[in-house]
Image (spheres, coloured by chain):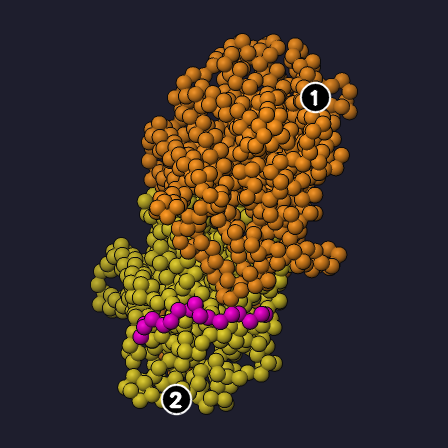
Amino acid sequence: MNGFDWDERLTASLIRWIALLPLLAALAHAAMIGLLRLQIAPRTVWLVSSAALVVSFLLSSAAIFDIVGGDSLGPIVDRVGPWLGGGVGERNFSADLSLRLDPLSSVFCVVVTSVALAVYAYALGRIQSGALPGDRVHRLFALLDLLVGSTLVLLLADNLILFFFGWTGVGVASQLLASFDYESEQASRSSATTFVVGRVGDLALLASILLLFDGLARSRAPALSFAGVEAAYRLLAGSQVELPLWLGGGGFPLLELVGGGLALAAMTKCAQLPLHFWLPGASQGPSTATALIHSVTTVVAGTYVLLRCSFLLGEAPVAMGGLVVVGAATVVVAGLAAATQLDLLRIVAYSTSAALGFVLIGIGLGAPSTATFLLLSHAYTKAQLVLALGIVQASQKGETDLRRMGGLARSMRWTHAMAAIATLAVIGLPPIGTFFALEELFAQVVAEGHPAVFTACIAGQLLLAFALVRAHLLIFWGARPSLGESEARVAQDPAGMIQYGLTTLAVMSICVGMLSPSQFWGSLVGIEQPMDTVGRFLAGTIAGPPDPGIEGALRWQTIGAVVLCTLAGAGWAFQRHARHGHRGPFRLAALEHATQALREGLYLEQAFDRVLVRPLRGFSSLLLAGVFEARLLDRVVVSGGAGLARRVVWSGLRRLQNGRVQSYAMLGVIALLLSLVWLAG
Amino acid sequence: MSHLPDPILLFVVALPAVVALALVTIGFVQTFTGMTPLPERVWRGVGLGTGFATFALTLVGVAWRFDPEAIGVQFVTGVGGALATEPRILLGVDGIGLCFVLATAGLAPLAILASRPDSADSVRSWIFVVLMLESSLLGTLTSLNLHAFLFFWAQTLLPILHWLGRWGGEDRGRMATRVWVTESVGLAGLLFVAFALAEMSEAQLGHAGLDLIDAPNAAAAIGTAIASPGTLLDLRIAASDQRWLFGILVVALVTRLPLVPLHFWLPGAHATSPTGLSILLATGFAQTAAIGLLRFALPLFPEAALEARPILALVGIAALGYASLVALVQKELNRLIAYTSIGHAGFAMFGIATMNVQGLTGAVVQLLTHGLATAGIFVMIGALALRRGTTEVAAFGGLARPMPVCAAFFGLMVFSLMGFPLLGGFIGDLFVLLGSLDLSRELSVAALAAMGVAAAYLLWVQRRVFFGPVEEPANRGLIDLDRTERAMLLAIAIPILAIGVYPNPLLRRVEPAVLEILHQMGRVSLPESEIVPVVDGASRSAIASAGSEEPG
């Protein structure tokens, strides 16, 4: 392979551009918007962003062949140079600016750039139809580029600090996209919620990184790169952190703390209970942004942190258990919330929370490759669903209330078909969309998990199928609601780029599951040799077995359970809503109250506000600002002291104070002379 | 002048003061001869030109020629006595001083630019005050002995009081008095410590020189080397004395930082003071306190400093949390940003309290980037006050529509203050946290939580001022930042971005200085040959061979 050495190095130094190009495009847009106030045509904006993204996509596609072509699926590292460093000896903290392309990151890079390309194509369609005015287009693409670029940085980061940079970039972009319509009070508030929850995740991740580094430094093996941490983390297996007394004292395993921090960080980005409430608000932005946030950027960031550190999570059983519990709870609660919503965007948001709950259950059960597969399937299917529903939303002039829709199938046939494919792919109707991944996950749950977790998964899947099919029926089937003449809306299918983008996504979301028949499926259709599945491809990069541990009859039963609960959910929705549309509020008041609580996500956001935010503000304004600052410091210390001083000294100085700079200068000169005299003496 | 070979620092420090004194002389001549006074534009131009010239001199003469590999101070120069035993003013910079000097020299002309409307009357006197302030700040930041430090420290005070008391806003007299009272307490403490040290030096070394370094003297210059008469660092101070002196010195210095509970003068001062003074108060003025702590307090009283670590760290964290909570309920922009400064000062104190390489480096970077970001915000508050005549948060809302450029810059500065990656603030926060892990993991976690609260109030003000619907009719037609304001903010944003994106050049210069301080404290062992002060600018060997840090 000596002859190809230069070739490989060439590829290695190209990796940086995968992440850099979208970021440079974002920077260019930002400079034009924020500094130069340059107005350029929306198509030019689109062209700049898309060109960067296309190159990035081509590079990542080429890179994946590099990996496959290599002998051992080993990583390719693109080292740009030294970046930041400080400290001496074993506390030496230094990180290079280097990017690492391995099976895991290459798969995700291809997925992210391909989905983003489809979304960009869709966005061009929106521009062509004149739905977006020029300055909004510019701002939108600046933020989308930032979102995609930060995600790529996060995927390709070779060390924890660069990873953190990508992570916060994703968070900032999500927050800014949530406040895209900054002039509405609603958007401004949901942006704040997004920010605060994101900040919790940032700090949890930073705490984990710092604790990990500190632990390694204390073991005299400081490392920040993933390879270095993976080589050294076993040194920390026995190390304990003393808890402070108010937490009961005693020791707590360091790796559990690190794993817990990572899990908390992942929960915030994946919108898991009890920090799920930011996602519905953040979905109010443009549908292109929502598609990316829900599929390949923000939620991928949350999961990827766990996948990258999957080797480490094996040493943190408590954190893993926590992930399973949180995931299971989210699956059920978000499923219930999605099933009861009356708002299009909130259904999408809660269904994303539930889907990511499945992914986290997979990771928590020690099956990261299954979780990866599910996440990839989710990415394509959810992007398609959001965009299809985005067309509906646009055709209804931004209306998202399901009660005011219905019967759209007649005027929007193509959209109806797309939305139907997306819905079925998301709920995993065999054999399309997420089905294969869900089946693998359920098999993992049967093999490794508690029966309660399995029950939760079954219930969640049923509710999810019900919720999405219900939404679809309420939008497209049934009768058109009787709106006033002035509100009659012309709904028609889009044309051009929107169709191309969405059709591409539809093909991808149908096929994504079938691309990776597991070993089990291979043997079913008569392939003796296991095929190169996603799980096997990733086996070297992430921990855990590539395939579920069960086969045979039990596996068939699991598949039956998945199919059954999917069909049951869909059938229930058909039975309830196919002809009747929305049924109106429940007759039983208690039931209606419970539904309302579910719709509002169990009022957790309000609870945080009441329990945490308001008391804190009250405490500061009453005690700290009111009593301490204003009374104690201002009146007693300062005014008292100053008054005393004024009486004693100021009266003497007053004669000198005449407001003329010459006399002050004279005073200065005298002071200077005096001090020189003192110095000389 | 100086007998030392490279008097560049002397020029940098003296240039503004010389121009300022020339302005006074011209004033005298005018008054006595009855000449018609020159138009005010001229004086402004002279002030701006001097400011930019000083910055250019710092950039080309000091920063460009600074050797990042060398441990120890560079460009040592002095005025006054030729021997170490004689009183003199001794100047020099290490990596820390370099950052702060660059920041102050760079922001001083911006302070003049930012104060366009504040000083309608008597521009000449005002320029005199600004230049004197710049000169004394630069002198304080480069002092290498207590004589110089005291001299410049005290000299800083008069221009500030004058600027605040004459050109300040409402309630300026009271606020000036408040600053004066607080600063007098600090000055008294400093003087006390200086006298005590002089006495000890007299007793132990036989002379009252208050130099920190063993600078080559005139005898060495003509080839007859004489034995070193000893410096302050050679003093052996009993542990009990160290405790007292360290305590007094720290209290005296942190009045300026300002650390809770000695912060009470700052919110009022910021609310009253003109934009230019606010900028310098947030940068150079606070940084003089940090220089005092790093260059004098830690190396002179190492045992007491190490003992005080937990207290200082606790006070720092408490200050951060306290200031963040108080800021949460502020209703006026200047006061709110003042509490940001107070909180970040606490965080910097926390970094200093770690007394290891990363913590001190982080504190320095943090003070630098915080100063820059705050200066930018003050420029914008000044611009808003000029347009709307008020700085109450409630008077604004939805400004992103009429003032998009201002919104973009405000977002950038606020994100830097919150410590977001790719912006300078993050690097300081990261290194302070890294250093603190060595001291106490619990405190690091507490610091992280306090950072979270700090983010909350900054977000709140950004949201309240720039987002949401435009409700006040007066806000609808606001004019966005003009070219001068944009240029100023760009000049501030570029270093913030540069530090955040590629911090290594900065860290490479700060770390040797920190290593030297820790070496003087006996916490890091360096090969003896490497800590000779670099006078001729010759490159010394790299710090790569620096020994390992002793466990604290």
* Range of magenta residues: B536-552
Tell me which amino acid carries mark 2. Ala
Front position in the image: B79 or A511: A511
Note whether B298 is above or below A75 in the view shown.
below
Q: Chain of mark 2?
A: B
Question: What chain is colored orange?
Answer: A
**Label 2 – label 1 distance at C-alpha:** 94 Å
Residue A378: give x, y in percent of width and height: 57, 30
Note whether B397 is above or below A128 in the view shown.
below
Magenta residue check for B413:
no
What kind of element bears circle 2? loop
Residue found 60% across the figure and 47% down from its top: A311
Residue B212: give x, y in percent of width and height: 44, 78
Residue of label 1: A564
Residue A491: give x, y in percent of width and height: 50, 13
Give the colour in which the image draws chain B: yellow
How many residues crowd mark 1 within 10 Å: few (<14), some (14–19), many (20+)? some
What kind of element bears circle 1? helix
Which of label 2 and label 1 is nearer to you?
A: 1
Residue of label 2: B227
